Protein backbone atom coordinates (compact mmCIF):
# COMPACT_ATOMS: atom_id res chain seq x y z
CA UNK A 1 0.00 0.00 0.00
CA UNK A 2 1.31 3.41 -0.97
CA UNK A 3 0.67 6.29 1.40
CA UNK A 4 -0.15 9.62 -0.13
CA UNK A 5 0.99 12.69 1.73
CA UNK A 6 -0.35 15.73 -0.04
CA UNK A 7 -3.71 16.75 -1.42
CA UNK A 8 -2.15 17.59 -4.79
CA UNK A 9 -1.16 13.94 -5.07
CA UNK A 10 -4.76 12.87 -4.93
CA UNK A 11 -4.76 11.20 -8.31
CA UNK A 12 -2.10 8.76 -7.12
CA UNK A 13 -3.45 5.26 -7.03
CA UNK A 14 -3.82 3.90 -3.56
CA UNK A 15 -3.65 0.19 -4.30
CA UNK A 16 -1.97 -0.12 -7.71
CA UNK A 17 -1.94 -3.52 -9.38
CA UNK A 18 1.69 -4.69 -9.42
CA UNK A 19 1.28 -6.28 -12.85
CA UNK A 20 -0.74 -3.69 -14.80
CA UNK A 21 -0.98 -0.56 -12.63
CA UNK A 22 -4.79 -0.41 -12.55
CA UNK A 23 -6.58 0.10 -9.24
CA UNK A 24 -7.16 -3.00 -7.15
CA UNK A 25 -10.70 -3.28 -5.81
CA UNK A 26 -11.95 -5.15 -2.75
CA UNK A 27 -13.70 -8.35 -3.91
CA UNK A 28 -16.43 -9.35 -1.42
CA UNK A 29 -16.62 -13.00 -2.43
CA UNK A 30 -13.08 -13.92 -1.44
CA UNK A 31 -12.06 -10.85 0.56
CA UNK A 32 -9.00 -10.17 -1.64
CA UNK A 33 -7.93 -6.97 -3.34
CA UNK A 34 -8.48 -7.87 -6.97
CA UNK A 35 -7.47 -6.27 -10.28
CA UNK A 36 -10.55 -5.95 -12.50
CA UNK A 37 -8.33 -6.00 -15.63
CA UNK A 38 -5.70 -8.69 -15.20
CA UNK A 39 -7.19 -10.64 -12.28
CA UNK A 40 -4.18 -10.18 -9.97
CA UNK A 41 -5.15 -10.85 -6.35
CA UNK A 42 -3.56 -9.93 -3.07
CA UNK A 43 -4.64 -10.31 0.54
CA UNK A 44 -5.70 -7.28 2.54
CA UNK A 45 -2.70 -6.59 4.77
CA UNK A 46 -3.23 -7.46 8.42
CA UNK A 47 -2.75 -4.31 10.44
CA UNK A 48 -1.98 -6.33 13.58
CA UNK A 49 -4.35 -4.03 15.45
CA UNK A 50 -7.41 -5.22 17.30
CA UNK A 51 -10.74 -3.44 17.12
CA UNK A 52 -10.44 -1.32 20.24
CA UNK A 53 -12.83 0.73 22.28
CA UNK A 54 -12.00 4.41 22.64
CA UNK A 55 -12.66 6.72 25.55
CA UNK A 56 -15.86 8.71 25.08
CA UNK A 57 -14.62 11.53 27.33
CA UNK A 58 -11.47 11.89 25.30
CA UNK A 59 -13.16 12.01 21.91
CA UNK A 60 -16.42 13.82 22.54
CA UNK A 61 -14.78 17.25 22.42
CA UNK A 62 -12.37 16.39 19.64
CA UNK A 63 -11.52 19.25 17.29
CA UNK A 64 -11.46 18.58 13.54
CA UNK A 65 -7.68 18.87 13.36
CA UNK A 66 -7.39 16.04 15.89
CA UNK A 67 -9.50 13.69 13.81
CA UNK A 68 -8.36 11.09 11.35
CA UNK A 69 -8.86 10.53 7.66
CA UNK A 70 -10.72 7.65 6.09
CA UNK A 71 -7.93 7.29 3.56
CA UNK A 72 -5.19 9.67 2.58
CA UNK A 73 -6.79 10.31 -0.81
CA UNK A 74 -10.46 10.12 0.22
CA UNK A 75 -12.83 12.48 -1.56
CA UNK A 76 -16.11 13.77 -0.24
CA UNK A 77 -19.24 14.90 -2.01
CA UNK A 78 -22.53 16.19 -0.68
CA UNK A 79 -25.78 15.28 -2.43
CA UNK A 80 -27.38 18.52 -3.60
CA UNK A 81 -30.83 17.05 -3.00
CA UNK A 82 -30.86 15.21 0.36
CA UNK A 83 -27.64 16.56 1.84
CA UNK A 84 -26.08 13.15 2.59
CA UNK A 85 -22.30 13.21 2.45
CA UNK A 86 -20.47 10.30 0.86
CA UNK A 87 -16.78 9.53 1.01
CA UNK A 88 -14.92 7.49 -1.53
CA UNK A 89 -11.51 6.83 -2.92
CA UNK A 90 -10.74 7.07 -6.67
CA UNK A 91 -11.37 5.32 -9.02
CA UNK A 92 -14.80 5.29 -7.34
CA UNK A 93 -17.01 8.18 -8.53
CA UNK A 94 -19.85 10.11 -6.93
CA UNK A 95 -22.51 8.72 -9.30
CA UNK A 96 -26.14 8.57 -8.26
CA UNK A 97 -27.13 9.29 -4.65
CA UNK A 98 -27.83 5.98 -2.86
CA UNK A 99 -30.32 7.65 -0.55
CA UNK A 100 -32.51 9.80 -2.78
CA UNK A 101 -31.69 8.73 -6.33
CA UNK A 102 -30.53 12.01 -7.91
CA UNK A 103 -27.43 12.15 -10.06
CA UNK A 104 -24.82 13.95 -7.97
CA UNK A 105 -23.33 16.87 -9.88
CA UNK A 106 -21.72 18.66 -6.91
CA UNK A 107 -17.98 19.14 -6.88
CA UNK A 108 -15.99 16.60 -4.93
CA UNK A 109 -13.45 17.86 -2.46
CA UNK A 110 -10.78 16.33 -0.30
CA UNK A 111 -12.60 14.62 2.57
CA UNK A 112 -12.91 16.52 5.83
CA UNK A 113 -11.43 14.69 8.79
CA UNK A 114 -13.76 12.39 10.72
CA UNK A 115 -13.56 10.18 13.77
CA UNK A 116 -11.85 7.41 11.84
CA UNK A 117 -13.59 4.04 12.04
CA UNK A 118 -12.30 1.45 14.51
CA UNK A 119 -13.80 -1.45 12.72
CA UNK A 120 -15.39 -2.44 9.47
CA UNK A 121 -17.54 -5.38 8.53
CA UNK A 122 -16.34 -6.03 4.96
CA UNK A 123 -18.82 -6.80 2.19
CA UNK A 124 -19.15 -10.54 1.68
CA UNK A 125 -21.64 -10.60 -1.18
CA UNK A 126 -20.88 -8.98 -4.51
CA UNK A 127 -22.89 -6.33 -6.28
CA UNK A 128 -23.80 -8.98 -8.86
CA UNK A 129 -25.24 -11.30 -6.19
CA UNK A 130 -27.08 -8.43 -4.52
CA UNK A 131 -28.49 -7.36 -7.91
CA UNK A 132 -29.67 -10.89 -8.73
CA UNK A 133 -31.40 -11.13 -5.35
CA UNK A 134 -33.01 -7.76 -5.97
CA UNK A 135 -34.40 -8.77 -9.39
CA UNK A 136 -35.97 -11.83 -7.81
CA UNK A 137 -37.41 -9.69 -5.02
CA UNK A 138 -38.83 -7.23 -7.59
CA UNK A 139 -40.47 -9.95 -9.67
CA UNK A 140 -42.42 -10.98 -6.59
CA UNK A 141 -43.76 -7.46 -6.02
CA UNK A 142 -47.29 -7.27 -7.24
CA UNK A 143 -48.55 -4.04 -8.76
CA UNK A 144 -45.16 -2.42 -8.49
CA UNK A 145 -45.03 0.65 -10.72
CA UNK A 146 -43.03 0.25 -13.91
CA UNK A 147 -40.59 2.81 -12.56
CA UNK A 148 -39.43 0.16 -10.10
CA UNK A 149 -37.83 -1.61 -13.05
CA UNK A 150 -35.08 0.94 -12.56
CA UNK A 151 -33.92 -1.32 -9.76
CA UNK A 152 -33.55 -4.23 -12.17
CA UNK A 153 -30.58 -2.47 -13.79
CA UNK A 154 -27.20 -3.71 -12.56
CA UNK A 155 -26.07 -0.23 -11.48
CA UNK A 156 -29.25 0.59 -9.56
CA UNK A 157 -27.78 -0.36 -6.20
CA UNK A 158 -24.32 0.42 -5.04
CA UNK A 159 -22.15 -0.75 -2.16
CA UNK A 160 -21.83 1.83 0.58
CA UNK A 161 -20.57 1.50 4.13
CA UNK A 162 -23.04 2.97 6.61
CA UNK A 163 -21.68 4.55 9.81
CA UNK A 164 -22.68 3.30 13.26
CA UNK A 165 -21.56 3.98 16.82
CA UNK A 166 -21.44 1.38 19.54
CA UNK A 167 -21.12 2.29 23.20
CA UNK A 168 -19.94 0.38 26.25
CA UNK A 169 -20.67 1.92 29.61
CA UNK A 170 -21.24 1.15 33.28
CA UNK A 171 -24.27 2.63 34.95
CA UNK A 172 -25.60 3.14 38.45
CA UNK A 173 -29.09 4.48 38.93
CA UNK A 174 -30.73 5.84 42.07
CA UNK A 175 -34.47 5.64 41.96
CA UNK A 176 -37.59 6.44 43.91
CA UNK A 177 -40.99 4.94 43.32
CA UNK A 178 -43.82 2.94 44.77
CA UNK A 179 -44.23 -0.76 45.30
CA UNK A 180 -47.71 -2.20 44.96
CA UNK A 181 -48.60 -5.49 46.70
CA UNK A 182 -51.89 -7.21 46.03
CA UNK A 183 -54.11 -8.38 48.85
CA UNK A 184 -57.55 -9.91 48.71
CA UNK A 185 -60.62 -9.06 50.73
CA UNK A 186 -63.65 -11.31 51.01
CA UNK A 187 -66.81 -9.42 50.20
CA UNK A 188 -70.38 -10.57 50.53
CA UNK A 189 -73.04 -9.69 48.03
CA UNK A 190 -76.62 -10.65 47.16
CA UNK A 191 -77.63 -12.41 43.98
CA UNK A 192 -80.99 -13.64 42.67
CA UNK A 193 -80.83 -17.36 41.86
CA UNK A 194 -82.70 -19.28 39.15
CA UNK A 195 -85.74 -19.78 41.42
CA UNK A 196 -85.98 -16.02 41.97
CA UNK A 197 -84.74 -16.13 45.57
CA UNK A 198 -82.22 -13.62 46.95
CA UNK A 199 -79.12 -15.49 48.18
CA UNK A 200 -75.99 -14.21 49.85
CA UNK A 201 -72.66 -15.07 48.20
CA UNK A 202 -69.00 -14.17 48.77
CA UNK A 203 -66.20 -13.23 46.43
CA UNK A 204 -62.48 -12.31 46.63
CA UNK A 205 -61.72 -8.74 45.61
CA UNK A 206 -58.18 -7.64 44.78
CA UNK A 207 -56.73 -4.48 46.29
CA UNK A 208 -53.24 -2.96 46.02
CA UNK A 209 -51.29 -1.72 49.01
CA UNK A 210 -48.76 0.94 47.92
CA UNK A 211 -45.57 1.67 49.81
CA UNK A 212 -42.64 3.96 49.10
CA UNK A 213 -39.63 2.33 47.44
CA UNK A 214 -36.14 3.58 46.67
CA UNK A 215 -32.76 2.09 45.95
CA UNK A 216 -29.85 1.80 43.56
CA UNK A 217 -29.33 -0.53 40.60
CA UNK A 218 -26.15 -1.05 38.59
CA UNK A 219 -25.73 -2.50 35.10
CA UNK A 220 -22.91 -2.60 32.57
CA UNK A 221 -23.77 -2.27 28.86
CA UNK A 222 -21.77 -3.77 26.02
CA UNK A 223 -21.95 -2.69 22.35
CA UNK A 224 -25.13 -0.63 22.27
CA UNK A 225 -25.45 -0.13 18.49
CA UNK A 226 -26.72 3.22 17.22
CA UNK A 227 -26.97 4.21 13.53
CA UNK A 228 -24.96 7.34 12.75
CA UNK A 229 -26.97 8.00 9.59
CA UNK A 230 -30.28 9.80 9.15
CA UNK A 231 -30.61 8.88 5.48
CA UNK A 232 -32.53 5.70 6.30
CA UNK A 233 -35.35 5.34 8.80
CA UNK A 234 -34.22 3.51 11.92
CA UNK A 235 -36.90 0.89 11.23
CA UNK A 236 -35.29 0.10 7.90
CA UNK A 237 -31.86 -0.25 9.49
CA UNK A 238 -33.28 -2.41 12.29
CA UNK A 239 -34.82 -4.66 9.66
CA UNK A 240 -31.34 -5.40 8.30
CA UNK A 241 -30.19 -6.80 11.66
CA UNK A 242 -28.60 -8.96 12.88
CA UNK A 243 -25.05 -7.97 11.92
CA UNK A 244 -22.35 -10.55 12.55
CA UNK A 245 -20.32 -8.12 14.63
CA UNK A 246 -17.89 -10.85 15.79
CA UNK A 247 -16.58 -10.82 12.19
CA UNK A 248 -15.60 -7.17 12.55
CA UNK A 249 -12.14 -6.35 11.19
CA UNK A 250 -9.85 -3.51 12.28
CA UNK A 251 -10.35 -0.62 9.89
CA UNK A 252 -8.20 -0.76 6.80
CA UNK A 253 -8.76 1.55 3.80
CA UNK A 254 -8.37 -1.51 1.53
CA UNK A 255 -11.92 -2.58 2.43
CA UNK A 256 -13.20 0.63 0.87
CA UNK A 257 -11.55 0.10 -2.53
CA UNK A 258 -14.49 0.01 -4.94
CA UNK A 259 -17.07 1.14 -2.37
CA UNK A 260 -18.29 4.37 -0.84
CA UNK A 261 -18.71 5.23 2.79
CA UNK A 262 -21.24 7.61 4.23
CA UNK A 263 -20.04 10.35 6.55
CA UNK A 264 -21.75 10.14 9.95
CA UNK A 265 -24.63 12.58 10.31
CA UNK A 266 -25.18 11.78 13.98
CA UNK A 267 -22.08 12.77 15.94
CA UNK A 268 -20.52 10.94 18.88
CA UNK A 269 -22.44 12.89 21.54
CA UNK A 270 -25.81 12.72 19.73
CA UNK A 271 -25.27 9.01 19.24
CA UNK A 272 -24.76 8.58 22.98
CA UNK A 273 -28.04 10.42 23.63
CA UNK A 274 -29.77 7.82 21.47
CA UNK A 275 -27.88 5.02 23.23
CA UNK A 276 -29.04 6.42 26.59
CA UNK A 277 -32.66 6.20 25.42
CA UNK A 278 -32.11 2.55 24.48
CA UNK A 279 -30.40 1.80 27.81
CA UNK A 280 -33.07 3.64 29.80
CA UNK A 281 -35.64 1.01 28.86
CA UNK A 282 -33.38 -1.74 30.19
CA UNK A 283 -32.55 0.21 33.37
CA UNK A 284 -36.22 0.82 34.06
CA UNK A 285 -36.75 -2.94 33.86
CA UNK A 286 -33.98 -3.39 36.44
CA UNK A 287 -35.59 -0.78 38.70
CA UNK A 288 -38.98 -2.51 38.51
CA UNK A 289 -37.37 -5.85 39.35
CA UNK A 290 -35.55 -4.22 42.29
CA UNK A 291 -38.75 -2.65 43.62
CA UNK A 292 -40.45 -6.03 43.41
CA UNK A 293 -44.06 -6.56 44.45
CA UNK A 294 -46.92 -7.02 42.03
CA UNK A 295 -46.93 -3.54 40.48
CA UNK A 296 -44.44 -0.72 40.43
CA UNK A 297 -44.46 2.99 39.83
CA UNK A 298 -41.15 4.63 38.96
CA UNK A 299 -41.17 8.31 39.92
CA UNK A 300 -37.56 9.30 39.44
CA UNK A 301 -34.36 7.77 38.08
CA UNK A 302 -30.95 9.38 38.21
CA UNK A 303 -28.35 7.51 36.16
CA UNK A 304 -24.59 8.01 36.20
CA UNK A 305 -22.55 6.69 33.30
CA UNK A 306 -18.87 5.96 33.80
CA UNK A 307 -15.98 4.33 31.94
CA UNK A 308 -17.88 5.02 28.72
CA UNK A 309 -16.09 3.86 25.59
CA UNK A 310 -17.17 3.75 21.98
CA UNK A 311 -16.33 2.34 18.59
CA UNK A 312 -17.06 3.89 15.23
CA UNK A 313 -18.04 1.14 12.80
CA UNK A 314 -18.79 0.86 9.10
CA UNK A 315 -21.35 -1.76 8.12
CA UNK A 316 -21.88 -2.87 4.50
CA UNK A 317 -25.09 -2.12 2.63
CA UNK A 318 -26.06 -2.12 -1.03
CA UNK A 319 -28.42 0.79 -1.42
CA UNK A 320 -30.30 2.55 -4.15
CA UNK A 321 -33.12 5.01 -4.53
CA UNK A 322 -35.34 6.25 -7.28
CA UNK A 323 -38.01 8.91 -7.59
CA UNK A 324 -41.52 8.22 -8.75
CA UNK A 325 -44.45 10.68 -8.56
CA UNK A 326 -42.36 12.95 -6.39
CA UNK A 327 -41.75 10.20 -3.83
CA UNK A 328 -38.40 8.58 -3.07
CA UNK A 329 -38.28 4.80 -3.00
CA UNK A 330 -35.33 3.24 -1.22
CA UNK A 331 -33.99 -0.29 -1.37
CA UNK A 332 -31.36 -1.60 1.03
CA UNK A 333 -29.57 -4.94 0.96
CA UNK A 334 -27.49 -6.30 3.85
CA UNK A 335 -23.97 -6.64 2.38
CA UNK A 336 -23.31 -9.75 4.53
CA UNK A 337 -26.56 -11.71 4.38
CA UNK A 338 -28.20 -10.44 1.16
CA UNK A 339 -31.42 -9.67 3.05
CA UNK A 340 -33.47 -7.06 1.16
CA UNK A 341 -35.75 -4.36 2.50
CA UNK A 342 -37.40 -1.62 0.56
CA UNK A 343 -40.40 0.52 -0.06
CA UNK A 344 -43.19 -1.53 -1.51
CA UNK A 345 -45.09 0.88 -3.73
CA UNK A 346 -48.31 0.00 -5.51
CA UNK A 347 -49.13 1.36 -8.92
CA UNK A 348 -52.55 3.00 -8.79
CA UNK A 349 -52.80 2.64 -12.59
CA UNK A 350 -52.15 -1.09 -12.57
CA UNK A 351 -54.77 -1.63 -9.89
CA UNK A 352 -57.32 0.62 -11.69
CA UNK A 353 -56.65 -1.19 -14.94
CA UNK A 354 -57.31 -4.57 -13.33
CA UNK A 355 -60.55 -3.26 -11.80
CA UNK A 356 -61.59 -1.88 -15.21
CA UNK A 357 -60.88 -5.20 -16.94
CA UNK A 358 -62.96 -7.04 -14.33
CA UNK A 359 -65.85 -4.59 -14.80
CA UNK A 360 -65.76 -5.08 -18.59
CA UNK A 361 -65.78 -8.88 -18.16
CA UNK A 362 -68.80 -8.62 -15.84
CA UNK A 363 -70.53 -6.28 -18.31
CA UNK A 364 -69.96 -8.71 -21.19
CA UNK A 365 -71.29 -11.61 -19.10
CA UNK A 366 -74.39 -9.60 -18.19
CA UNK A 367 -75.01 -8.66 -21.85
CA UNK A 368 -74.49 -12.27 -23.04
CA UNK A 369 -76.47 -14.08 -20.36
CA UNK A 370 -78.49 -11.36 -18.67
CA UNK A 371 -81.68 -11.67 -20.83
CA UNK A 372 -82.24 -15.41 -20.39
ZN1 LIG B 1 -3.81 -5.80 -13.06
ZN1 LIG C 1 -29.34 12.36 -2.07
Image: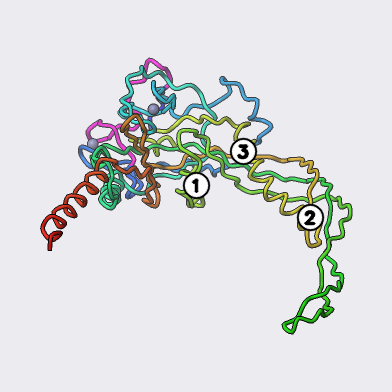
Q: Is residue 219 above or below residue 192?
A: above
Is residue 19 in the magenta section?
Answer: yes
| Helix, strand or loop at mark 2 | strand
Q: Quadrant of residue 90?
A: top left
Cα separation, mark 1 vs mark 3, equals 14 Å
Task: Give how far across and how far down residue 140 sits, in percent.
Answer: 28, 53
Mark 3 Cβ inside 8 Å of ligand 2: no
Q: Which mark is residue 117?
A: none
Tell me whether circle 1 and circle 3 mark residues in contact (CB < 8 Å): no
| Helix, strand or loop at mark 3 | helix
Q: Pointer 1: what residue? A: 238
> The magenta stretch spans which residues?
5-26
| Helix, strand or loop at mark 1 | helix
**Residue at image point 34% right, 32% down:** 15
Task: Give how far across and how far down residue 238 sits, in percent.
Answer: 49, 47
Residue sitting farthest toward the left: 368
Q: Is residue 82 above or below residue 182?
A: above
Q: Pointer 2: what residue? A: 296
Q: Earlier in the sequence, mark 2 or mark 1?
A: 1
Magenta stretch: dominant secondary structure: loop
Q: Pointer 3: what residue? A: 274
92 relative position to 251: left or right:
left
Q: Earlier in the sequence, mark 3 or mark 2?
A: 3
Amino acid sequence: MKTVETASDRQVHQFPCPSCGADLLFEPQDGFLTCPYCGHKEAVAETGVQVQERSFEQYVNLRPEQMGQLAANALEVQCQSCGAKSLFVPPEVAGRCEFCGVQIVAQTKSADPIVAPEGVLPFSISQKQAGAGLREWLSSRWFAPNGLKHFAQPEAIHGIYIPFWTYDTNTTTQYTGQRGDYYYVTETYWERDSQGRDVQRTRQVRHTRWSAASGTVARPFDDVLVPATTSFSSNRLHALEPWDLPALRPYNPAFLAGFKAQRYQVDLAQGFDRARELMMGVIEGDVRADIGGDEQQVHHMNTQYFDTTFKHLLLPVYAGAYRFNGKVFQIVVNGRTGEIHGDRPYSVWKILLLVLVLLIVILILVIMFGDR
